[in-house]
Image: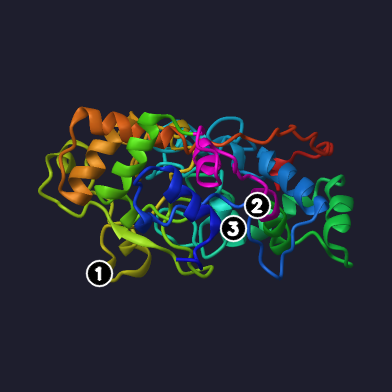
Amino acid sequence: MHNLPRSILLAVALASGTSQAANWQPLPEKAPEPADNPTTSAKVELGKMLFFDPRFSATGTVSCNSCHNIMEGGDDSRPVSMGIHGKMGGRNAPTVWNAAFLSVQFWDGRAPSLEEQAKGPVVNPVEMGMKDLDTAIGRVRAIPGYRPLFEKAFGGDDPVTVANAARAVAAFERTLITPGSPYDRFVQGDRKALDSQQQRGMKLFDSVGCTSCHSGPAFAGPKMPEGQGFFAKFPTFADSPYVARYDLMADKGRFQVTGKESDKHMFRVPTLRNIADTAPYFHNGSVKSLDEAVRVMAHTQLHKELTESQVEDIVAFLNALTGPYPEITLPRLPATPGTTLLDR
C-alpha cells in the first residue's frame, strides 16, 4: 500500500469508498516523446503550420485541422469525416487532443506512432488525396517560406523531407494535451473538485466495469509500449438490440489491417478525455449523445442495463474529464508562389 503513487492514495481517501482497483491516475503535464524526435519550439511551430495548411491536399482545401479541429474537441463533429471533393470517409474522426498518450493511432491501430499517423491521411484517396508522399513533400518544397523553417527545426543540407514533416506534425500534436480537469484535481487531492454526483459516477464507472477497458491517465487502457496498442472487441455482446440499431457490426475493425480472424471487430480503445466535446460517438459516429453512448456501452460491452440515474451519474463523471484547453494561436502560413500548387 505504501508503494502506491500519492495521487492514488488521495483519491481513495477522498472518494469515500471509491474502489482502489481502478488505479485512478491524473493526466501528466507533459506528453511522452520518442528519443529520436525530442520536442523543440521550432518543430512545434513548423508542425502547427503544416497541421493547418490545406495546400498539401489534392484539391488544396483539406488540412489536418479540417477533420481534427483543435478549436473545438479535436474532431469534426460529423459521424464520419469529409475529405476532398466532398467524399465521406468510413469512420468517425478520433480527437487529436491527448492522442500523444496513445500507443497506437487510428481506430484500427495501424499507425504505431504519431509520426506514422501524420503520413496516412495525406495519401488517403478520400481524405487529402495526394498521389504519394513524394508529391506531397514536393508541394512543401515549392513554397519557399517553408525551407528556413525546416532548417531551423532540423538542420542539415536537405531538411525538407517527408520524415521531417511528419516529425514536426507529431511534435505539435504532443503539445495538444489537457491536464488539470476536475477529475485530475480530485485525484491529486482537491476534495471539492468533483461534486457528489460526479463522485457517485466515478464509483459506478469502476463498479459496473468501465475501467476494465477505460483505465490509465488517458482512460484508454493501460500504458503500452509505443506500437503495441490496447484493443477491445466492440461489440462484445452481439445480441444487444443496440448492435442493429446503430449498425455496430458492419466495420470489421483491426481485421481490415491484419486479416486475422481474431481481430474481427477489434478496435483501439479510445480516450475518454474531453469526451463531452467529441460527439457523435463510436467508430461509425452513430450515437449522437453521451448518455446514449453510456447505455450502449453498458449493454454491448458489459451486458448490463443501467438505470437512468446511473446513466446520469456516469455522464456527470465523464464531464469531469474535460480539461482546460491551451490557447492556440492560428499560424500565419508561408505565401504561395506564383505557380499554381495544384499543377504539381
Q: Which residue is mark 1?
A: 262
Looking at the image, residue 314 sits to the left or right of residue 131; the answer is left
Q: In percent of the image, x 71 and y 48: which residue is there?
A: 344
- Report the colour scheme: rainbow
Mark 2 or 1 closer to N-term?
A: 2
Q: Which residue is mark 2?
A: 174
Q: At label 2, which amino acid type do we have? A: Arg
Q: Which residues are magenta?
A: 170-193
Asked whether the residues under the numbered discs 3 and 2 touch, taking CB atoms below 8 Å apart as contact, a structural biologist would say yes
Q: Nearer the viewer, residue 62 or 65?
A: 65
Q: Nearer the viewer, residue 193 or 335?
A: 193
Quadrant position of residue 128: top right
In 3D space, how far apart are the residues under numbered discs 3 and 2 (Cα atoms)? Answer: 9 Å
Looking at the image, residue 46 sits to the left or right of residue 303; the answer is right
Dot 2 surroundings within 10 Å: few (below 14), some, or many (20 or more)? many
Q: Secondary structure at mark 2?
A: loop
Q: Would you say residue 200 sits in the magenta stretch?
A: no
Asked whether residue 153 is in view, the answer is yes
Q: Would you say residue 177 sits in the magenta stretch?
A: yes
Q: In percent of the image, x 21 and y 41: which residue is there?
A: 247
Mark on residue 114?
A: 3
Question: Can you name the residue that lies furthest to the left here?
Answer: 239
